[in-house]
Image (cartoon, grey):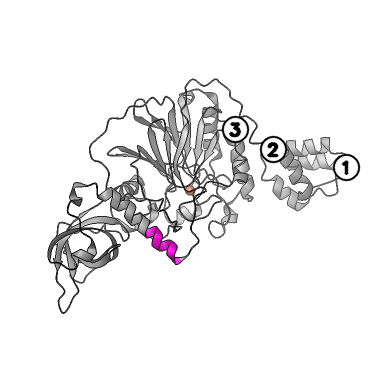
Amino acid sequence: MRETILRELAENNTLLSPGAWEYLDTLDDPVSIVQEMVRTSTDLPFPVGRDVLVPFVEAKRPSRKEKTPDVRPPSIKTHEVKIRSDITGNSTCTGELSDFTNHFMDRYNKLKTILIRRREAKGILNINNVVKRKGEARIIAMIGDVSTTSNGNISLTLEDPTGHIRGFISSESGAYSTDLLEDEVVIAVGKVWEKKKSFDTTFAINEIIRPGVPRSVVKRSTDVQGKIAFIGDIHIGSKTFLKDSWERFLSWMESGENGSSEIGYLIIAGDLIDGIGIYPNQEDELEIKDIYEQYRVLGKMLRRIPSHVQIVAIPGNHDIVRNMEPQPSLPKNVQDLFPDNVIFCGNPSMIHIGGIKILMYHGGSINDLSDMLSSVDTDQPCTAMKEMLERRHLVPVYGKKTPIAPEKEDMLVINDVPDIFVTGHMHKTDVMQHYNTLLINASTWQDQTDYQKMRDIQPDPAYVIIYDPVLNQVDKKKC
Ligand SMILES: [Fe+2]
């Protein structure tokens, strides 16, 4: 390739500057670009720098308005994808202390609204009333300061907008559990012990009830015809991006064969690109070092997917938006690099396809949950998603590795129980049913990175997970 380019340029009495070579290396078909440049330009400078090459390439790019060629007529009728909840355009936080107060108050109120519907909420009292009395009581409280005492009991604080009380769970109590997380909101049932010399008024807890999800199985029927495909963590730009597997996926989608003509929707669970500066020395692991070029390359690839397939994409921690959750959708200048059939929304977002409710979340909190809960296995990220659903919150604990933006409205609360809940981030392929919700962790298109090697994480790449709404069945396709 280099020789051809050098020869073309030499015949026109010029060559490329080092910067122009570096840029050319990031492009898909550098030889044709140089050939076209020498053919159409009459007076090339010596040397040809990045300042000449970049505008030339930019002018050749397809615009968002350019239609994706459709190789076949759609055999299915697709529904409109409706975005039901998304931070994009609704961010209000300024980083003030009052933002945090409002944020946690909103979290408490939203989770209380869910808890109050439970039969166990009958007879709930405010904490300011509970501290004045003796005997049995039940409260809806946010948990804080969880610790284990020297006797193996659990000490914690319980708080609601009216006050707080010290809580205690004996290691002999039925409520004893090591999976209590700070900041989760629960119904606590127990007995008030009066203030004595050596300790404050204490609430001895004998039962903890989480918001949870309905246990009765609801039969779902739908008129959605198209199958819904789930992918995630593409990581375009990384040296470990799995080009061959991705090519097999695109060729399959493009062909309309072996069932791909039945796909009506493609859901992408974040980390579209590898980004830049995400971790120290990432530069050494990048094949494309320009973040916009990474998006441009992906935009071009997605044009190969037939235009009737509705693609919905959220960002992840490698994308160009803020690294605090919730994240807004990709900016307009990046969206413009993609074909028209891509819908961009924030992380997280709730979308509806026909009557199917899909909660999309990149999955930043899965690592935190695996550090704190013995029930969570990083090889099976759905085990963490189950815990999020039971707590009805995507990032149940504040202040760990997942940065949270203290928005006035806590959009990380799971208000509505989804039919499908999809995450990525863990680079695993995992599917599980939790009561009425299908849980999916959507694989990756990146091979093991050095960072994963260091932490002994084995990715499970190159799978497409396909949900058939009519048969209510899930399939996995290896590419
Ligand atoms: Fe990722």
* Mark 1 residue type: Asp
414 vs 367, nearest the viewer = 414
284 vs 265, nearest the viewer = 265
Instruction: Looking at the image, tell me whether mark 3 or mark 2 is earlier in sequence order.
Output: 2
Quick one: quadrant of the N terminus?
top right
| Badge 2 element | loop
For label 3, being within 8 Å of ligand 1 is answered no
Q: Relative to 433, does residue 372 appear above or below in the rendering?
A: below
Which residue sits furthest bottom?
Answer: 197
* Mark 2 residue type: Arg
State the residue at coordinates (17%, 78%): 198
Q: Which residue is mark 2?
A: 61
Which x, y percent locates residue 240?
54, 46
The main secondary structure of the magenta stretch is helix
Q: Which residues are magenta?
A: 97-104
Could you tell me how far apart the alpha carbons at marks 2 and 1 are, in whole angstroms?
22 Å
Q: Which residue is mark 3?
A: 303
Which x, y percent locates residue 417?
33, 42
In this rendering, which labeled residue sits more in front, label 1 or label 3?
Answer: 3
Q: Is residue 152 left or right of residue 95?
A: left
> Callout 3: 10 Å neighbours few (<14), some, many (20+)?
many
> Callout 2: 10 Å neighbours few (<14), some, many (20+)?
few
Q: Quadrant of residue 420?
A: top left
Instruction: Looking at the image, tell me whether mark 2 or mark 1 is earlier in sequence order.
Output: 1
Q: Is residue 342 left or right of residue 400?
A: right
Q: Quadrant of residue 139?
A: bottom left
Q: Which residue is mark 1?
A: 43
